Amino acid sequence: MASNRFGRIFAFSSFGESHGPAIGCLVDGCPARTPLSENDIQPFLDRRRPGRNKYVSPREELDQVKILSGVFDGLTTGHPILLLIENQDQRPEDYAKLQDVFRPGHADATYQAKYGIRDHRGGGRSSARETASRVAAGAVARKMLGSFPATRGIKVMAGLVRLGSVAAEKAVWDLPAINSNPFFCPDPTAIQAMQAEMEQRMRQGDSVGGEVEIRAFGVPPGFGEPVYDRLDARIGAACLGLNAVKGVEIGDGFAASHGVGGRDHNDQMRTPPSGILSEAYQSNHAGGILGGISTGQEIVVRCAIKPTPTIACPQKTVDRDWREVELAASGRHDPAVCIRAVPVLEAMLWLILADFFLLKRAGGRPE
Ligand SMILES: Cc1cc2nc3c(=O)[nH]c(=O)nc-3n(C[C@H](O)[C@H](O)[C@H](O)COP(=O)(O)O)c2cc1C
């Protein structure tokens, strides 16, 4: 069964391959009268696009988005919004040697086994080129949430908090700091060490993994639909649904199982003078979600991302006839996919929040 749709009420379906003529998505369920233009989407695509600096894939894609439907006189009409991004810098010849050879760590062998046919040019649909559609849809979700008083104050920020052996200090969370370096790292003191790590890996023709943290501020309490649509479960699925993400933590995550007692882990409560739930908690080990429902505190999510599978140094693999071969891949690749995963994970959180907001309005307590 095909699965190219994300979301229940605020939903999008993506289409297109790495080396086809275009990629894009159809956003459905966006309420009518949301102000929307290409200018609301383009800056987010610009942050994700390849070719921005020497630490990301050098493929030169401008990722210019066109809105083909669902917007009239600068407002959404309540009908499907088609977002189209043309592919411009394809070099299918770079992938000729991958026609019959499976890249270790990539999706080539599993796609071939499942479908019996595979677009080897850039990995076809398994390429993270598809994630531009997520970013475009996420920008629409953000704009929609910004147009309702209850959700206007939400801010989502993601940043790279680890690159290989270099860990960032997580204290500073502001967008100018995150956007001021090539790694989307919130800690300016870690940049030099990250550069050194990248230079070394790139010299070796190797790649490296990292960790992305996503924070959502100003999410009202009550987002999440227990028991099978818990907010944390949806976030986990969305993050693991991104190429190369191999682990997800909410709040203290795995550290909560490392011997700490409930006395220290539980977020103690006291009477909030304001009567607002989020202000009753004295700490946020839970990461802003309890019982699958947002508490109104900051939502804190961390994703572990593996090293890029396609690398220049030689690897052992097999071809379609099970012959053992050695592969030293060429072509244009991200030496650390965790960098460009940052804007994509941010977009996924916007999309989840948009969907839960509309679900809450549909079935939850009235505003
Ligand atoms: C933003 C982003 C960019 C990526 N760029 C590349 C790339 O240039 N080369 C590559 O081999 N893999 C890249 N990947 C990872 C592959 O898409 C992914 O590892 C592959 O589809 C196999 O899926 P899996 O790792 O989730 O099992 C990228 C992933 C993301 C999120």
Image (tube, helix red, strand yellow):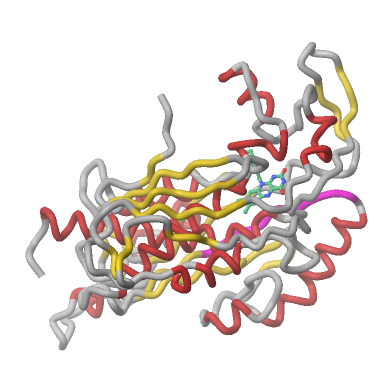
Number of labels in the image equals 0
Residue 304 screen position, x and y as percent: 59, 52
Ligand 1 shows up in which quadrant of the image? top right
The one of 128 and 235 positioned closer to us in this rendering: 128
**Residue at the bottom extreme, as displayed:** 273
137 above or below 243?
below
Was residue 190 drawn as part of the magenta stretch in this picture?
no
322 above or below 207?
above
**In the picture, residue 216 is in which quadrant?**
bottom left
- Where, quadrant-wise, is the N terminus in this rendering? top left
Residue 306 screen position, x and y as percent: 66, 47
What residue is drawn where x is 23% and y is 58%? 78
**Residue at the top extreme, as displayed:** 321
Residue 233 screen position, x and y as percent: 35, 47
What residue is drawn where x is 71% and y is 81%? 189
204 above or below 316?
below
**In the picture, residue 250 is in which quadrant?**
bottom left
Magenta-highlighted residues: 205-213
Q: Is residue 206 left or right of residue 19?
A: right
Residue 256 screen position, x and y as percent: 44, 56
Q: Is residue 8 left or right of residue 308?
A: left
What residue is drawn where x is 63% and y is 71%? 184
**Residue at the front extreme, as displayed:** 73
**In the picture, residue 124 is in which quadrant?**
top right
The one of 210 and 104 positioned closer to us in this rendering: 104
Residue 293 is at least partly visible in this image: no
Residue 112 is at least partly visible in this image: yes
What residue is drawn where x is 85% and y is 30%? 97
- Where, quadrant-wise, is the C terminus in this rendering? bottom left
Was residue 208 drawn as part of the magenta stretch in this picture?
yes
